């Protein structure tokens, strides 16, 4: 492969890594660099991001509002599957990367670029997520991953490079966290968090108040679902992005959605991450509640058995793989009757289900009641139990005979 590069499209956030990478690409490859920033709800001052990119040397800057697409086509499909990695992580960063990579590749086509670049390190998952997505779009694309090439092997070195070249970055030596935010979550890694024994400082958190500082009065809300997707809060219809933003506000002010985990990265190492996912935490609890009265038992159990695999595929970066499409199609089939309303109580870090109702409900009070009924013969259970116990009885009888 030729070392000559004419134009690169860089996934640019305006943070420490990508700000340095922008300058480094220009110096190293003597090429034009187009900066692309995706607005997925991270809350950055995108005008400032564009200004800094141009100041650092970008020939052109794309800033695309992808919030609705992100929530509708990436977050909601994953939540229809109740996706969760290693029992805790709601996949906020993992779900945004394929969308960003897809749009980045579209811009590369528009600009006639012969390469794309990203700021993911050679130790992390994001390099895999970006690059698997790139190759799914174009199997011949040139990828430049500076963290696997340059000599700037620490964030301290990056800060020194930024200072040397007059590059403005939000990271400071006092708070050297690596953060990634979007409408679903914000993550914190690095710095003092690399010691899994150290408690994260409370002033680090952005989306949530601490449970101790949350209101003393519980907040009751209702979420309406249609075929597995939330469509309204307290009877007010909202777009996907608006709805998740409102759930973030409600969950965040009640101290919901903080987790502190050590997870297994795809590349093989363990990593400590702290996450805030207020709206997603509320949404998952509500979705599971409405499923409980609308989904057939065997369908639910089969889908549930596939949640670890689905979540692993998202986490590992295989969003555009054929196996992911197969799983998503199956999940979506299970959601056809998952419609109704869930009532929740939000209180000091807890999200409790208070009630659920649905026109599609297959819950029957006539059958479930402990009071007198005329639809179920309790004597039938005797034969049911004896048939299910038959193999156990035979095994024990043969043991006794031997």
Image (cartoon, rainbow, N blue to C red):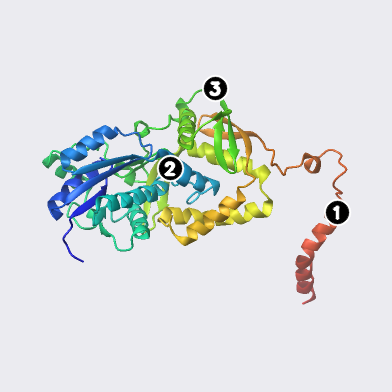
The answer to whether the residue labelled 3 contacts the one labelled 1, judged by CB atoms less than 8 Å apart, is no
The x and y percentages for residue 383 are 84, 58
Task: Count every numbered label the image shows and give the total.
Answer: 3
Residue beneath the point at 56% across and 25% down? 218
Q: Compared with residue 272, is residue 223 higher up or lower down, i.e. above or below? A: above
The x and y percentages for residue 63 are 30, 39
Q: CA distance from mark 1 to mark 2?
A: 52 Å
Upstream in the sequence, badge 3 or badge 1?
A: 3
Horizontal side of residue 45 vs 266, given as left or right: left
Residue beneath the point at 19% across and 36% down? 168
Q: Residues within 10 Å of mark 3 (few under 14, many from 20)?
A: few
Q: Compared with residue 380, is residue 371 higher up or lower down, i.e. above or below? A: above
Secondary structure beneath dot 2 equals helix
The x and y percentages for residue 325 are 49, 57
Upstream in the sequence, badge 2 or badge 3?
A: 2
Q: Which mark is residue 380?
A: 1
The answer to whether the residue labelled 2 contacts the one labelled 3, judged by CB atoms less than 8 Å apart, is no
The x and y percentages for residue 399 are 75, 73
Between 14 and 111, the one lying in front of the other is 111
Secondary structure beneath dot 3 equals loop
Residue beneath the point at 49% across and 29% down? 250
Q: Which mark is residue 69?
A: 2
Residue that numbered label 3 is attached to: 217
């Amino acid at each position: 492969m030729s070392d000559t590069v004419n134009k690169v499209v860089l996934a640019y956030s305006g943070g420490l890594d990508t700000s340095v990478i922008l300058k480094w690409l220009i110096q190293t490859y003597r090429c034009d660099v187009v900066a692309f920033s995706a607005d997925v709800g991270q809350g950055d001052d995108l005008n400032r991001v564009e200004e800094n990119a141009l100041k650092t040397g970008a020939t052109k800057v794309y800033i695309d509002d992808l919030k609705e697409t992100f929530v509708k086509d990436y977050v909601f499909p994953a939540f229809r599957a109740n996706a969760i990695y290693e029992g805790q992580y709601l996949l906020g960063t993992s779900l945004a990367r394929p969308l960003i990579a897809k749009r980045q590749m579209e811009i590369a086509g528009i600009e006639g670029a012969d390469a794309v670049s990203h700021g993911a390190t050679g130790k992390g998952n994001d390099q895999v997520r970006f690059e698997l997505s790139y190759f799914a779009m174009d199997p011949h694309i040139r990828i430049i991953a500076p963290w696997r090439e340059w000599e700037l092997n620490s964030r301290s070195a990056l800060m020194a490079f930024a200072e040397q070249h007059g590059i403005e970055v939000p990271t400071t030596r006092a708070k050297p966290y690596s953060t990634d935010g979007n409408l679903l979550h914000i993550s914190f890694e690095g710095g003092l968090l690399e010691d899994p024994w150290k408690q994260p400082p409370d002033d680090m958190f952005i989306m949530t108040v601490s449970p101790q500082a949350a209101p003393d009065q519980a907040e009751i809300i209702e979420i309406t679902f249609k075929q597995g997707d939330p469509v309204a809060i307290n009877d007010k219809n909202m777009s996907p992005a608006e709805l998740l933003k409102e759930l973030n506000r409600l969950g965040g002010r009640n101290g919901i959605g903080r987790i502190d985990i050590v997870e297994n990265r795809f590349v093989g190492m363990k990593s400590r991450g702290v996450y805030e996912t207020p709206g997603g935490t509320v949404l998952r609890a509500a979705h599971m509640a409405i499923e409980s009265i609308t989904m057939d038992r065997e369908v639910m159990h089969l889908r549930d058995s596939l949640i670890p695999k689905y979540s692993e595929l998202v986490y590992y970066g295989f969003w555009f793989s054929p196996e992911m499409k197969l799983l998503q199609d199956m999940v979506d089939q299970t959601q056809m009757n998952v419609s109704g309303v869930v009532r929740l109580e939000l209180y000091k870090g807890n999200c409790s289900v208070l009630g659920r109702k649905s026109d599609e409900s297959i819950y029957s009070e006539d059958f479930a009641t402990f009071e007198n009924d005329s639809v179920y013969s309790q004597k039938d259970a005797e034969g049911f139990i004896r048939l299910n116990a038959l193999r156990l009885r035979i095994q024990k009888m043969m043991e006794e005979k031997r």
